[in-house]
Image (cartoon, rainbow, N blue to C red):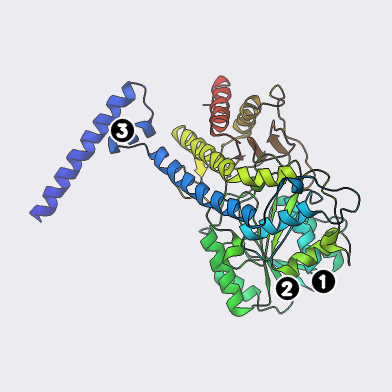
């Protein structure tokens, strides 16, 4: 008992000294997090950044080896027009993507207009009337609701007799494995969709290990079910991709992570050859599939963008961490927190009210290289059920690998910040957003 009391006394003494040291540094203008760094030694941000760079190196090596394996040469940059027959560059791109993602095949095309379009092509290519699609991590991203038919729209899956079910997360935000197993007992279930990133929710992004566990659970009971992963915002954040842990289809946009900021349009679908081929038949036409599709001079940007992507993604991650770091100091809730593990480039910040959201987005826009003079305002965007505000002064319209922010205008008024082709630009963007908010006396 005396020993316990002694330890308590020592602990209280240490805590008291730490508080006094922290107060001392605060008097000289240091932030609370900087005080924490000073007290415990080392730069914690730099340690996290070092780990990000280690992942970037490993992914970069994987991409480089794929390009070397398939003997990428200058002539592959030429592209094609018209029907796009015999486009050797397009064929090499798809071999490289399949290799990088650990998949059997790939469809990488400028005709895929967005991540939503790539998902739509995958759904319609592989589902038939009477089949059931199940989302196993709650409600999918807003623009997919019209595709599925949850929100009525012309040409939705529902109009073609394809059913939809949803397994919500548990109240604590964890995956509902019992609910998933119950849902797939329905023999009409043909496909499950797993959205890696949080979308406009405040749940944690799914890690590769969590995605692998979901797929393993499903396959152990129903190996015939197609497991599709919406990989948007998650590419190259971790060493592996969902297709390397059992996903049958993995889908994303080229104006996000894998395009490296250079792709001006396009999307990708990678996975099992039969499912990729089925998607290709829907993108072009039955019987044509992957054999057609002009690349119109996009090959070089697709390839060079992929080559640069690991570094660009690392920069975006550092920017997201810096955003969380600064806004936690200011008393805002961030998801994830600055020192938590990450599986995508998106940083969510609960801004408490609409005024904070608008001011934040004004700051991000003000820091942009393009359209910096424009003031973003909420508007009724197609595919969303409430007004949405978006800030993105990007070289490529809508490219959320570039510095951008967006938010649905509804409680808890969460803004979603992502991108930054360079680390310095991400930091400038966040600092400018804080300056604008301070200028309006909001913080």
Tag on residue 173? Answer: none
| First along the sequence among labels 2 and 1 | 1
Is residue 298 left or right of 84 when viewed as pictured?
Answer: left
Residue at the spot 52% in from the left edge and 36% down from the top edge: 323
Is residue 373 left or right of 315 when viewed as pictured?
Answer: right
- Rendered view: 199 above or below 208: above
Tag on residue 38? Answer: 3
Residue at disc 3, secondary structure: helix
Is residue 146 left or right of 346 when viewed as pictured?
Answer: right
Counting from the top left corner in percent of width and height, residue 134 is at 69, 67
The residues tagged by marks 1 and 3 sit, at their Cα atoms, a distance apart of 60 Å
Q: Nearer the viewer, residue 12 or 249?
A: 249
Q: Residues within 10 Å of mark 2 (few under 14, many from 20)?
A: many
| First along the sequence among labels 1 and 3 | 3
Residue 300: quadrant of the picture: top right
Counting from the top left corner in percent of width and height, residue 136 is at 63, 65
Tag on residue 190? Answer: 2
**Whether label 2 touches label 1, CB < 8 Å:** yes
| First along the sequence among labels 2 and 3 | 3
Toward the left, the furthest residue is 2
Tag on residue 128? Answer: 1
């Amino acid at each position: 008992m005396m020993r316990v009391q002694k330890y308590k006394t020592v602990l209280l003494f240490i805590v008291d000294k730490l508080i006094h040291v922290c107060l001392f540094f605060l008097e000289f203008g240091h932030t609370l997090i900087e005080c924490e760094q000073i007290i415990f030694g080392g730069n914690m941000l730099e340690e996290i950044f070092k780990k990000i760079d280690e992942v970037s190196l490993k992914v970069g090596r994987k991409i480089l080896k794929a390009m070397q394996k398939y003997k990428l040469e200058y002539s592959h940059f030429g592209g094609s027009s018209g029907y796009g027959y015999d486009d050797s560059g397009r064929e090499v791109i798809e071999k490289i993507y399949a290799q990088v993602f650990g998949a059997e095949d790939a469809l990488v095309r400028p005709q895929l207009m967005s991540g939503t379009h790539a998902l739509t092509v995958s759904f319609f290519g592989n589902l038939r009337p009477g089949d059931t699609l199940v989302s196993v991590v709650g409600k999918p991203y807003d623009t997919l609701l019209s595709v599925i038919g949850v929100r009525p729209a012309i040409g939705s899956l529902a109009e073609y007799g394809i059913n939809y079910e949803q397994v919500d997360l548990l109240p604590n935000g964890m995956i509902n494995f019992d609910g998933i197993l119950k849902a797939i007992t329905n023999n009409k279930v043909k496909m499950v969709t797993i959205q890696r990133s949080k979308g406009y929710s405040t749940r944690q992004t799914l890690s590769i290990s969590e995605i692998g566990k979901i797929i393993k659970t499903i396959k152990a009971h129903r190996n015939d079910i197609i497991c599709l992963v919406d990989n948007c915002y998650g590419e190259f954040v971790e060493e592996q991709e969902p297709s390397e842990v059992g996903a049958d289809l993995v889908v994303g946009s080229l104006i996000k992570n894998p395009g490296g900021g250079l792709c001006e349009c396009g999307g990708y679908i990678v996975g099992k050859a039969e499912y990729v081929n089925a998607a290709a038949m829907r993108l072009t036409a039955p019987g044509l599939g992957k054999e057609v599709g002009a690349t119109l001079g996009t090959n070089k940007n697709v390839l060079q963008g992929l080559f640069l992507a690991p570094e660009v993604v690392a920069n975006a991650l550092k920017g997201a961490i810096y955003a969380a770091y600064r806004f936690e100091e200011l008393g805002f809730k961030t998801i994830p927190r600055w020192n938590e593990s990450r599986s995508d480039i998106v940083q969510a910040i609960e801004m408490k009210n609409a005024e904070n959201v608008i001011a934040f987005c004004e700051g991000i826009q003000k820091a942009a290289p393009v359209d910096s003079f424009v003031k973003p305002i909420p508007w009724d965007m197609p595919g969303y059920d409430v007004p949405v505000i978006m800030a993105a002064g990007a070289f490529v319209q809508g490219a959320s690998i570039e510095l951008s922010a967006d938010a649905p205008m509804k409680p808890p008024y969460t803004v979603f910040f992502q991108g930054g082709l360079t680390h310095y630009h991400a930091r400038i963007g966040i600092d400018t957003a804080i300056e604008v908010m301070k200028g309006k006396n909001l913080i």
